[in-house]
Image (cartoon, rainbow, N blue to C red):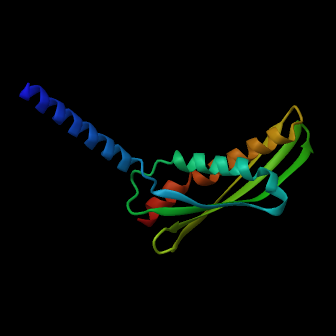
Amino acid sequence: MQKQLRIGLITISLAAALIAGSALAVSPRVQVAEITVGEHERAMLKSFQRMVRASVQQMYIQKVRGGPFLISASLVDLKTKRGDFGLQATAKVVATLRHKKSGALIGSIQGKATAVASGGSTVEAQDSALKAAVESALSNVPDVLSREH
């Protein structure tokens, strides 16, 4: 009975250590500070916020030391026009990286993308362009951080 109790306590201790270790491993070293859109893009704010947060959560920054870091992202331009193959949307996103503690600027990155919706859906074209612009800009964050440290 003593032996089973001891094994049970060891198992619980190991499980607690693993849970604590995994909690530390997923603590965000890049945190979203601010997400903004221009006056003409207000309708896209919620969608843009969702895209930026999802992209930040999926970042692989294992090789980067230091942190935490803050990222601010802005949708600076979103235009839609009729093209030869349907409705065409172009989005431009700018992001800045800072050290959380000092506020020092690490870098600024931008992404730009164009998408075409053959069915003529403005929302579809804008969402596709915006998602690609966010991914284009934020995919560079690990590289920028690794050059800094």
The outermost residue toward the front is 1
Quadrant position of residue 127: top right
User: Which residue is at a point 83% across and 36% down the rendered structure image?
Assistant: 117
**Which residue is depicted at the point 44% across and 62% down?**
68
Residue 128 versus residue 6 in the image, above or below: below
Residue 5 drawn above or below residue 75: above
Q: Position of residue 20 (x, y in %)?
A: 31, 46
Question: Quadrant location of the C terminus?
Answer: bottom left
In the image: residue 77, left or right of residue 106? right
Q: Quadrant of residue 85?
A: top right
Residue nearest the observer in this picture, 23 or 112: 23
**Looking at the picture, how far across and down is residue 131, in whole percent?**
69, 45
* The furthest residue to the left: 2
In the rendered image of this protein, does residue 3 appear above or below residue 12?
A: above
Against 55, is 64 above or below?
A: below
Please state which of residues 110 and 51 is positioned toward the viewer in this rendering. Answer: 51
Seen at 65% across and 47% down, the residue is 50
Picture coordinates of residue 9, whole percent (x, y): 17, 35
Q: What residue is rendered at 45% in x and 66% in y?
A: 148
Work out which quarter of the rendered image holds the N terminus and state it.
top left
